[in-house]
Every structure is written in structure tokens, then in C-alpha cells.
Amino acid sequence: MRVCLVRTPFFKLLGIKKVHFPLSIGYLASYLEKGGHNVSFVDGEAIDYNLYRGLLYRSPINEIVVYADPYFIQRKINVVTKIMQDRNANVWNILIKKISETKPDVVGISCYTVDMTAASVLAGRIKKDLGNIPVVLGGIHPTSDPQGTLEGIEGADYVVVGEGEESFLALINNIDKKGRLDFPVKGILARGRNYFEPRPLIEDLDSIPFPRRDFYDKSNYIFGAALLTSRGCVFECTFCASHLTWTRKVRYRSVANVIEELKVLKAKFDVKRIRILDDTFVLNKKWILEFCDALKKNNLKFTFNCSGRINTVDEELLRVLSGSGFDSIAFGVESGSPRIIHSIKKNIDVSRVTDIIKMANRFKFDTTSFYMTGHPGETLEDIRMSEELFKKSMSKRGELSMLIPYLKTGVGNEAEKKGFKFKIKDCYKFFHARNRVLFNMTKLSDREFLAEHRRFEKIIKRRNYKTAFKKLLKLALKYCL
Ligand code: B12
Ligand code: SF4
């Protein structure tokens, strides 16, 4: 069968030029191809829709700063609203044309929550313009709400729930040319059927072929290649949706298998920088030490970035990582208030944040800290504690998100009880770098909450600019001397 995989546009509609290449698509493509199918990819994030012109769009600042800058993003939201409300907007025409050129038997769309509005418009247009081609939705949002997805998106025929490789292949192998499936397939919810049986996770991650990476033009994507060494996370942060796809059991690839993929990335794609996307890369010290040793033995020289965790890194780990090419590490701190940390089940020791980040700075890591505002029950004092911790910890960069209560997460369940109504037509507004309140679960009024959020945002922005300036200065000196 000819399968067309699609990523809907999100960052591109906000005027952001370069995005990450999605590993989900890479993995699904190689798995389906191994199963004998022909796969193409239409990346809605890699098309220039000519939405914005002028200095702002072209300026390099667009790629560096705007990425997480709520002020730039919020200014563009009216443009995005128009596109989402107009099924005949040029963005959809362009996407339909690209999809139709691949002559698909089946279309698969990958969706986070924020992509659901676009997925809904696109699925409708596929049915209208391309005939009755089966449309399959997968990814974190359809996984968290398979019934709601089929009810809310008329053009969707199937939802793949959870890990996609095996279920999607089984679906494609079993639907006939008219897109009908006569018997249930594990992991698939089909329109008009109430029967659903979950599919067990793939036990041996080494059995999955490396993600396909050859169908993209490098100039559309952020520098470096994404890599996944494990799937899953043991922690229970109440705002996080990861467990809905991966559960709370962590599965690891073998070190040898990851080294093999790195060799391919070097030889075939001349990759120099690797972005490790694992939920909690630093969880398994033994695996990391073995991995860093193998990098040396195989003389593999890359630079890496990864996520850290305050309570699972120590001096030895940071030293080894820094000696193996890791130069950038991001810590999810989320709050400086021990009371909030406890209530969101973040399970970190706030009193260690400063020491660990300073230690990482000493090893010359580019340190980033992720914070959030909008935690349930958060007070002004709690937000001020976060600001103080960020300032004290000397993290070189920060990123501030306003909490979004995703479906089927602890916070999402709490928000629903408090009256938060989830609508697919509004999903495109559910991004984190925002300067408008979406749903207020704090102890503050909307006005107070927004003012505090903006105050914190300013502190973080100042630090980010300072770090960027220092970097540029260093670079300039390097080239001038
Ligand atoms: C890396 C990452 C990013 C990166 C890169 C994203 C990218 N597009 O490549 C960046 C930083 C850009 C990012 C941005 C955002 N992210 Co993010 N991100 C992640 C992270 C850590 C890993 C994602 C990943 O690549 N996983 C590896 C691949 C292989 O897994 P996968 O994508 O889930 O795909 C598998 C299945 O879902 C399924 N599948 C997926 N698509 C499809 C399609 C079909 C047809 C089928 C059949 C199956 C299928 O099969 C795949 C293989 O098994 C996850 C956490 C997590 N554990 O999932 C959060 C996560 C997905 N992100 C999240 C969020 C909220 C965002 C943002 C909205 C934040 C924001 N800026 O406001 C944006 C939106 C970006 C967008 N629309 O592209 C949330 C999503 C929650 C939700 N309900 O939507 C997550 C789950 C984190 C969390 N804490 O809850 N993110
Ligand atoms: S540590 Fe990260 S991935 Fe794990 S539950 Fe918390 S936020 Fe989610």
C-alpha cells in the first residue's frame, strides 16, 4: 500500500522557520517499509506558506529567540485563527495538493493536542477532495482520547492508540483497498466499533529499524539529529502526558544498537550534533557510563544535548558526559516552591537545584531550566519562589511555560472537574509560550496571575539575552583574534 504520513503545521503558522524533524514519522516510515509498504511524508512544518513577509520573518532572531517567545507567538495568533476557521485557506490547499501528489491509499496524521484543530480541518479536506481514502490519526492526543478524537473529527476513520509501529503496520496489512477492516486489530479504534483491545508494548526496542531520515531537506530543520535511546519515564508529574503513550516502565535500547545508529548518522548524513529526546536520559547511570565508554572505543565524536534531572545527576555523571561531547543539558525544575513540587509529584529536591546547576555550569554545560506557572493552588509567594530559585541557580537559560491541562493527565482530570471544557476547535491555542490565561487553576485572579507570569518571563528573557550576548561575543573574539 502507498501510505502518506503527514505532520500538520504548527510552528510554521506562527512564522517560525526551522523545526525539529519528527522521530515519530521516521520510526513509522521505516517500520512500514520493512513491512513492504511504500511510504511518503508531507511535512506541514517544512512548507513555506508565504504567510509573513518582512524583516521580522527573515531576521536571524526569528530562529533563535522567537521559538519560545510568547510575545511574538501571541501576535501571530489572529493569522492562525483565520486559517483554522477557513477550510479553504491556501495552507490547506497546498497541503492537499502535496498529499494528492503522493497518490496515497492511506493517510496517517500525527498529532499532539495543539495539532488537533489542524488535523480536523485536514481530515475533512482529504475526504472532500481526495475521495474516501482512509485517514488514520496517531500520536499523543488521539492516544489520550481515542473516542473523543473519532467523535470530534469526522474525516478520521481509525485511531492508533499508543506506540504506533506494530499497530499501524497491522492496520495497513489488514485493511482492504476500500479502507475497510473486517476484524479488530490490537491497538486500533475504528469508527463505528466500540471494541478496543490494547496492544502490548514492543519488548525489544533493538528490533525496531532505525528511523528513516532520508526524505527531508536539511535546510528546513534545526541543526542536528534527534535520537531516542529509551522509551518511557518512571516519574508521575501530574502535568505530563508521556505515560499515556509509553507507560511508566522504561525500555532501553542496547548501547550497541544506539552506537550502530550513530555510525549511520555520521557516515550517511554527516551529522555532527545529536539531540537526545528521551524523557529522562539521566535515569540509568550504568547505561550512560557504558554508552560514553562505547563512544570513545568507537572513536565517535559528536556534540550532544539531553534532558537532566536534579535528583539523578551527580558529579561523576556530569564529568563523564562532559568528557564525551555533551555540552548542553536541560532540567525540568517547574517550581521553586517545595509545596508545589510536592503537589505536582515532581519528586525533586528543590534545595539541590542550585548546587546541581552550578555544578553543570562548572563542567561548561549550557544549562537550561524549565519552569511553569499556573500550577493548581499556586500563590503569588510560590511564583516568587520560582523566580528566586531561577535567579540563584545561575542556569544559563530558562524557558517558562504556562500550564496546559492536557486530557487524562492528573492536572487535566482536575481541570475537567473544575469546568475546563476541551474542544478540538480550540486546540491550536494550547501552546505553552503564552501571555494569555487559558484556564486559571491558581489562587490568583486572572489579572494577578498574568502580571506575575509576565514578571517571571521578563527575568528569564533577560538571562537568555545575556547568555546569547556572551556567546556571540565569544564567537566574535574567536574569529577576530
Ligand atoms: C521532543 C519533544 C518535543 C520537541 C520536538 C517535537 C517534534 N515535533 O519532533 C519540541 C521541543 C519541538 C516539542 C514541542 C512541543 N511539545 Co513536545 N515533546 C517532545 C517529547 C519529549 C518527545 C517526542 C518524541 O519525538 N518522541 C519519540 C517518538 C518516536 O514518539 P511519538 O512522537 O509519541 O510517536 C509514537 C506514537 O505516538 C505514535 N504516533 C505518533 N504519530 C503518529 C501518527 C500515526 C498516523 C500513527 C499511526 C502513530 C503515530 O507512533 C510513534 C512511534 O511509536 C515528548 C514527550 C514524550 N515522551 O512523548 C513531548 C510532548 C509530546 N510534547 C508536548 C508538548 C505539549 C509540546 C508543545 C505543544 C509545547 C509548546 N511549545 O507549547 C510543542 C508542540 C510541537 C508540535 N506541534 O510539533 C507534550 C504533548 C502533550 C499533548 N497532549 O499534546 C509531550 C507529551 C510532553 C509532556 N510533558 O506531556 N516537543
Ligand atoms: S520526569 Fe519528565 S517525562 Fe517524566 S513524568 Fe515528569 S515531566 Fe513527564
Image (tube, grey):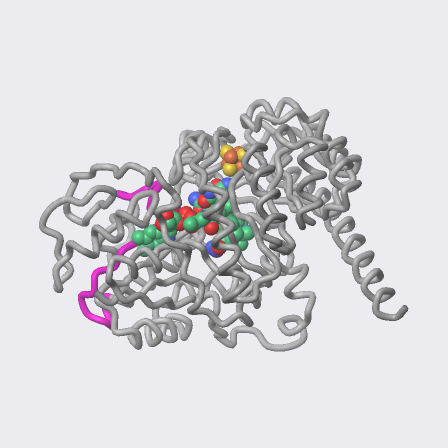
Outermost residue toward the right?
A: 481
**Number of dots carrying numbers:** 0
Q: Position of residue 128 (x, y in %)?
A: 23, 69
Q: Nearer the viewer, residue 423 or 37?
A: 37
Residue at image x 32%, y 48%?
Answer: 164
Of residue 199 and residue 256, the one placed in the foreground of this image is 256
Q: Is residue 440 visible?
A: no
Name, please, the residue furthest toward the front. 297
Residue at 60% x, 48% y is 297
The reply to whether residue 32 is visible in this rendering is yes
Q: Position of residue 171 (x, y in %)?
A: 21, 52
Question: Residue 180's x, y, as percent?
Answer: 12, 56
On whether residue 462 falls in the magenta region, the answer is no
Choose between 151 and 35: the one closer to the eye: 35
Quarter holding the C terminus is: bottom right
The relative height of residue 425 versus residue 377 in the rendered view (above or below) is below
> Measured from the top left, where is residue 410 in percent x and y?
45, 30
Which residue: 51% across, 43% down? 278
| Name of the residue lying farthest toward the left | 182
Q: Quadrant of the N terminus?
A: bottom left
| Residue 163, picture quadrant | top left
Q: Specify whether residue 142 is painted magenta.
A: yes
Bounds of the magenta segment: 127-147
Question: Which residue is painted at 19% across and 48% down in the image?
Answer: 190
